Structures are given as C-alpha cells and as structure tokens.
Image: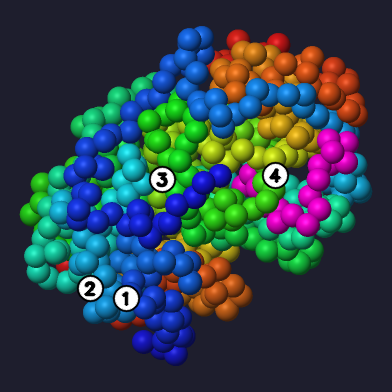
C-alpha cells in the first residue's frame, strides 16, 4: 500500500468504535454495513467479532426497524467474517433471501424470471444489493444457484448502451441513464461473468466516473471496479479518490472511506473473482 | 416527538430474528374511507387557520434573503433562539434541468433565519435517489453555497437516528427511524422544489419529508416507503416529521415527467406557509392542480393541516395571478383544475 493508501486505512481505523464496530459516520454507534465494509478494508479481527456478535439466528447481519428489516449488509458481512460457521450462515441467508416475485408492468417492465436482492426484506430487487450478494456468493459459494438469478437480473436491468441505474432499465417509456456508483458496484460483482456485458459497463464507467468525480463513494467504487477489471483508467480514478479525500475527508462517510481504502489498498484482492 | 434509544432497537439481535422478519410490509390502508380515522386524535388537533404567503421572485439573482425574510414574516414565523433544520429537496444532479431546491435560495434562507434570531441553522437532506450524497450536494453547488454563509450540512442518510412511533397509521410501518438532526431540531422547515411527480402527481413540502428518512435503513430510493404504499407513506412520514414551516422553491419548477426527468418551468414564485398542508394546497393551485383531487393532499387535510382555502389566510400575490399550468403526464390529467 502506498503512502496515500495508508492514510485512508488509518482514517478508517480511527473511525472504529470501542465495541469493535463502525458507525455510518465517524463518531456514531456501530452498524452492519460500515462495520462489514471496514472489516474487509482492514482485515480486522475486532470488526469480525462485532459482526459475529450481531449476526441473527437467520444468518443475516441487519438493521431492524420493526416491520422493515434491512439485511443488505449481509453479503459484505459474509466476506468480512472470514471462514467458519458465521460466514456459512450468512451465505445461507443470502441464498434464501432473493426478492419475492414482482409484477412487470408497462410502466416498469422487467424480466420477472429474475428477482435479485432487495435493500429490505421481502421488497423489490435493486442493482446495488443484488451486486453485493452476487459478489459474495461468487467469491465464497460459487456453486450457489442464486448466482444465476442475480447475474440474470443485472443483465436484464442493464441500461441502454451499458451500465446500470439503480434498479430499472426503462420507467414510463423512458430509457434510464446509468450512474457511476451503481455501474461500478455491478462491475465488481460481474468480474469474468459476461465479457460483453462487462465491456459495455466499463465503457460507460470510464465516461461516468469523470462526470461524477465529486462523489467519494462514487470514485472509490469506480476505482475498485476499474482495478479489478485491469482497466487503464484505474490510476486516474484512484487519483480522484485522493483528491476527494484531501478536499473533504469524504464527509466522514465511513462506508465511502472504507471503500476507498479497499479500492486503493491490498485488500482489493479479496474481492477478486478468479 | 417521542424518541427512543437507538442502541436498544436498531441492530437486529439473534433474539428477535424471525419475529421481525415475519412481519412483511404490506400496502397501507385505503385512502379516504370516510369512516376511517387512522390517526391518534390526541396527537393531531383539528387544523386551525393557516397562513400562507405567495411572493414573486423572477430569478435566483434577486434579493432572495430579503424576499425570504418578507415571506417568513408574512406567515408569522418565529425562530427566535431556535435550532432550525432546513430540509431542501436534492435527489439528483443534472445541470441541464431543475431537479433540486436551488442552493442560492437555501443560502438565502439560512441568512434570513439568522437575521430573525435563530440560534442555529443547519441544512439537512438524505437524497432519495442517489446513494452518494456527496456527489449531489457538491455538484449541485449546495456545499459551496452553504460554505459562503458558514452553514453546516448534515447527510440525513447517515445521521444518528432515533425511533419515532407513528401517530398515524396509513402504512403498517408503526414507527420510523428518523435522523437526530430532525428529532432534535426546535423548528423544521420543509423546503421543496415545485415539481410534478411521476408516481404521486406532484411533490411539495409533504412529499419532501421522504428525504428525512434514512436510506441506510429504508434503502434507496427509500424503497421500503414505496413498498408500503407511496401515498400512504407520504402521509405517515409527513405526520412524523411535521414540518413547522415550508418554503417552496417555485422560481423555476419542474413539469412533465418529474421529479427528475421533467422539464424546467419558470413559475417565478416562492410559497411560504406555517402549515405544510395549506402550503401544498396553495402550491398545487399555483401549479394548476385541483388540490382536492390530489388524494394524499386531500387526506392530509383531514388531520395534518388546513386544506380549506377559506381557512387559509393568504398574503402576497393572488394565486390566480401567478398560476402556471404545469404540464403533467397523461395519467395525472384528471388532477388539473
């Protein structure tokens, strides 16, 4: 790790709470997603312990807001936990937690044979949570049948010309635009899954990250995707990560900081699908 | 509003797993069933007379803080010694259109509120569309505008949160986790952009409250709320946030396929109100809607604020003189006056 990469990892380390977890913003109580991503970034035992302590009986590591349960961090938790029973239970949860059937309409058409994963249990599948579940399963349980569903969903939701919006390809007859952050998340998940799909996504990402370079999470995820795909743009995008960090400290957004540390550091290899 | 300790409830524990997961979020109650009153009577006093002011502003380069001050005084806004949370609407950035509450107006409001004696003015937003808040608030120019007036921005998507039991029951949500920046504020001001909305018809100060709900809990684009029933969720969220005042940015609004892909429309007004329902009723009229036909707005007028034009004291311009007929998608043609 270079000097700057060390700085990013150090900043993530500074955000760690006394209980071993990480909050969504520096100084806030620990929660699943920042803890899971920071644990990957730092390969951190205390973070792993927090994730293990907060894993529910169903294998998820979730935020519980009553009838709304956000289990979308479980995929990153599975990666962060390391090998063992906790990871296997998290993967079991992912396999069981595909989004329910949803109705395709003229307003929002999609292929109903694919479900993907939702942000919150039993709701609609979106690109970001689907990408992270596909990544975790392809890395850790490559024979999982649910992978086909997730890859199929991402293929179906690809925007016209390549790349990904948040969830859909067309709404109310309008082709939706792709975004850098979601395109990067999908590309991290799709390494070596579908060369043509990946190439279209990479082509979109090379254009998009420059237009959206003000966003810390955006350039961090874009750098991760470009590096994992061996793209020549990775170095320029990495410089953008440090520019944003120098200007803003990523507004103390721990998930963005942790992704920046992963994207620019050695832990990125843990996300490499071989 | 009552808040409970987040540590007690938020991170799911092994003990409650399965129980919470078994309770799916389903569509909310049927709107406008006259026998149903899905709110706690004790929490919502019958709406009284509301005050709204409609002021002309022909561009963002005029004396905006003067106009904002005039509008706030016209509605009797009292922010002396208060910690104020200004909640603009920023969901996405596209330099070719008018999606967001203009940063110049937000900065002007900060300035005006300080002049009126506010102890502290913080600007908070949790973009409902973009996960990367930093991209939206930087590229839109909001951070630079706030920097110029030395005001702080809080990303409501990643702020500390507190559980707020719902006092209305249009959805099955029961409670919402809301940012401390909202629950701890003395005064919350909803500051929407005047826009059409491709699912709800229009979006003003009530719908703007969706941005108070943290995406890291409810997902993007605040998907759990849509899943609970969009109009029902608008009612429950607005009833939980209960903005004290509203300032609607209608200098340039958005018509057609809003709230993101529509077309800018210069309507040249700012709408102020001491009641979010009354403000939206007047705002909807300015856009050429019949407020009674906007289901969630008509329902909100049953308990959350004043919807009767005869009981809305309007200052400034006559609505008929400043009405701009906002184009709508064909599905919403029946909502127009």
Please report whichever mark, 3 or 4, sits nearer to the chain's N-terminal start.
Answer: 4
SS of the residue at dot 1? loop
| Span of residues in magenta | B71-90
Residue, disc 4: B189
Discs 4 and 2 lie in a common subunit: no
SS of the residue at dot 3? helix
Discs 1 and 2 lie in a common subunit: yes
The colour scheme applied to this rendered structure is rainbow
Residue, disc 3: B218
SS of the residue at dot 2? helix
Discs 3 and 1 lie in a common subunit: no
Neighbour class for label 1 at 10 Å: few (<14), some, many (≥20)? some
Q: Is residue B273 magenta?
A: no
Front residue of A102/B151: it is B151
Give me the C-alpha separation between circle 3 and circle 4: 22 Å
Residue drawn 57% across the image and 19% down it: B299
Residue drawn 48% across the image and 71% down it: A26
Foreground mark, 3 or 4, reads 4
Q: Is residue A86 left or right of residue A217?
A: left
Q: Position of residue A235 (x, y in %)?
A: 44, 76
Give me the C-alpha separation between circle 3 and circle 1: 25 Å
Q: Where is residue A243 in the image (x, y as percent from the top left)?
A: 56, 76
Give me the C-alpha separation between circle 1 and circle 2: 7 Å
Specify whether residue B40 is in view: yes
Q: Residue A20 carries which label?
A: 1
Residue, disc 2: A49
Neighbour class for label 3 at 10 Å: few (<14), some, many (≥20)? many
Q: In this view, does B118 lie to the left or right of B227?
A: right
Give me the C-alpha separation between circle 4 and circle 1: 37 Å
Q: Quadrant of the N terminus of chain A?
A: bottom left
Q: Where is residue A230 in the image (x, y as percent from the top left)?
A: 32, 70
């Amino acid at each position: 790790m270079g000097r700057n990469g060390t700085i990013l990892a150090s900043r993530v380390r500074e955000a760690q709470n006394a209980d071993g977890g990480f909050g969504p913003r520096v100084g806030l109580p620990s929660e699943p997603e920042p803890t899971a991503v920071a644990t990957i970034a730092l390969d951190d035992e205390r973070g792993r312990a927090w994730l293990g302590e907060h894993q529910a009986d169903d294998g998820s590591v979730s935020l519980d807001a009553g009838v709304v349960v956000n289990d979308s961090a479980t995929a990153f938790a599975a990666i962060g936990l390391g090998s063992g029973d906790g990871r296997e239970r998290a993967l079991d949860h992912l396999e069981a937690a595909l989004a329910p059937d949803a109705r395709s309409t003229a307003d929002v058409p999609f292929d109903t044979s694919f479900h993907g994963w939702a942000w919150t249990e039993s709701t609609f599948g979106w690109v970001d949570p689907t990408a992270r579940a596909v990544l975790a399963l392809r890395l850790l349980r490559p024979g999982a049948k649910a992978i086909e569903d997730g890859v199929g969903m991402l293929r179906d939701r690809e925007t016209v010309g390549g790349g990904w919006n948040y969830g859909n390809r067309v709404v109310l007859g309008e082709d939706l635009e792709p975004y850098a952050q979601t395109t990067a998340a999908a590309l991290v998940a799709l390494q070596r899954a579908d060369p043509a799909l990946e190439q279209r996504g990479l082509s979109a990402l090379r254009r998009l990250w420059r237009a959206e370079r003000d966003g810390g999470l955006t350039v961090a995820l874009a750098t991760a995707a470009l590096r994992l795909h061996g793209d020549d743009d990775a170095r320029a995008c990495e410089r953008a990560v440090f520019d944003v960090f120098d200007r803003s400290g990523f507004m103390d957004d721990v998930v963005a900081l942790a992704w920046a540390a992963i994207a620019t550091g050695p832990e990125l290899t843990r996300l490499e699908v071989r | 509003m009552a808040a409970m300790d987040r540590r007690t409830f938020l991170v799911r524990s092994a003990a409650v797993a399965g129980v919470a997961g078994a309770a799916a979020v389903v569509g909310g109650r049927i709107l406008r069933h006259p026998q149903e009153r899905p709110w706690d009577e004790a929490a919502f006093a019958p709406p009284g007379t509301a005050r709204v002011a409609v002021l002309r502003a022909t561009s963002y380069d005029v004396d905006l803080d003067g106009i904002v001050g005039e509008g706030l005084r016209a509605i009797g806004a009292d922010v002396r010694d208060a910690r104020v949370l200004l909640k603009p609407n920023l969901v996405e950035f596209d330099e070719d259109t008018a999606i967001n509450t203009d940063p110049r107006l937000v900065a002007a409001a900060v300035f005006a509120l300080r002049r009126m004696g506010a102890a502290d003015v913080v600007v908070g937003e949790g973009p409902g569309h973009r996960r990367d808040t930093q991209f939206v608030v930087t590229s839109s120019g909001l951070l630079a505008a706030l920097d110029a007036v030395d005001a702080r921005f809080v990303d409501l998507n990643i702020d500390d949160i507190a559980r707020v039991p719902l006092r209305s029951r249009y959805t099955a949500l029961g409670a919402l986790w809301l940012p401390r920046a909202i629950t701890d504020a003395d005064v919350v001001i909803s500051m929407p952009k005047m826009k059409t909305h491709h699912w709800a018809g229009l979006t003003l100060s009530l719908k703007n409250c969706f941005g108070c709900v943290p995406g890291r809990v409810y997902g993007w684009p605040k998907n759990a709320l849509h899943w609970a029933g969009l109009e029902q969720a608008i009612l429950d969220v607005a009833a939980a946030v209960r903005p004290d005042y509203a300032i609607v940015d209608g200098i340039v609004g958005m018509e057609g396929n809003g709230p993101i892909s529509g077309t800018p429309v210069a309507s040249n007004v700012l709408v102020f109100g001491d009641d979010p329902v009354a403000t939206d009723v007047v705002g909807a009229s300015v856009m050429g809607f019949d407020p009674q036909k906007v289901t969630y707005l008509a329902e909100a007028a049953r308990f959350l604020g004043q919807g009767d034009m005869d009981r809305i004291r309007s200052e400034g311009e006559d609505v008929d003189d400043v009405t701009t007929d906002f184009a709508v998608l064909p599905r919403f043609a029946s909502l127009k006056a």
